Image (cartoon, rainbow, N blue to C red):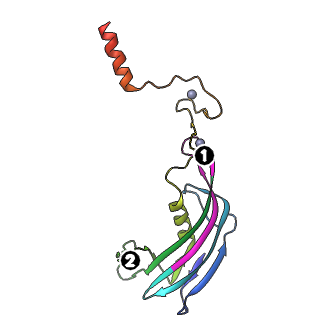
Amino acid sequence: MYISLVRMPADGLKFEHKYQEGELETSGFEFEFIETPSLTGWVDPVGTDMRLRSDIRARLKVPCDRCLKDVEIDIKMPVDLLYSREDPGSGKSGEIELHSQDLYFDIYQNDQIDLDAMVLEQLELSIPIRVLCREECRGLCPQCGTDLNIEQCNCTKPVDPRWQALADIKEKLS
Ligand SMILES: [Zn+2]
Ligand SMILES: [Zn+2]
């Protein structure tokens, strides 16, 4: 979904959108949707830039870092972004001059803002660095893949290399 910036009213433009199942392509991202995102927000011109403020709500599933089980994450996040118009003459689209305000910057092209790209990027950024199904998750056995939360496997635990070195010395001495 795009917001058209053509004939933008001076006091901005409100928008609202509830994504349908399958409307956003999440392949290549860390998450999948349990509940597709809904957005409310507005865009208003700030000089030649466009400021976008929005609330994003969604429910995601993300694999546990240790056991890969789905972890549900509820998202309710405000975003406040500034979009600069891409300068078609410069030919360097990815480069954005940094402004002094502490705002996130992006660019828009063809007088429209790509809301889908914004939502996917913001959701990806909102996922915690470490996702665990529970703090004490025991994860999967690195050798056989058994879920150690459910059962114990018979693999021998890898020996700590420091202890191995000590065992080698002992063997030499005996
Ligand atoms: Zn886990
Ligand atoms: Zn094992």
Q: Position of residue 80 (x, y in %)?
A: 50, 75
Ligand 1 within 8 Å, label 1 CB: yes
Dividing the picture into quadrants, the one containing residue 151 is top right
Q: Which mark is residue 133?
A: 1
Q: Residue at x 30, y 10 (%)?
A: 172
In which quadrant will I find the C terminus? top left
Provide residue 57's location: percent of width, then percent of height.
63, 67
Q: Is residue 75 left or right of residue 103?
A: right
Q: Is residue 99 above or below residue 170?
A: below
Residue that lies at the very extreme toward the top in this rendered image? 174
In the rendered image, which residue does mark 2 sit on?
101
Residue drawn at x 61%, y 27% as measured from the top left: 152
Residue type beneath disc 2: Gln
> Magenta region: which residues?
52-71
The answer to whether the beta carbon of the residue marked 2 is less than 8 Å from any atom of ligand 1 is no
Assess whether residue 110 is covered by the magenta stretch. Answer: no
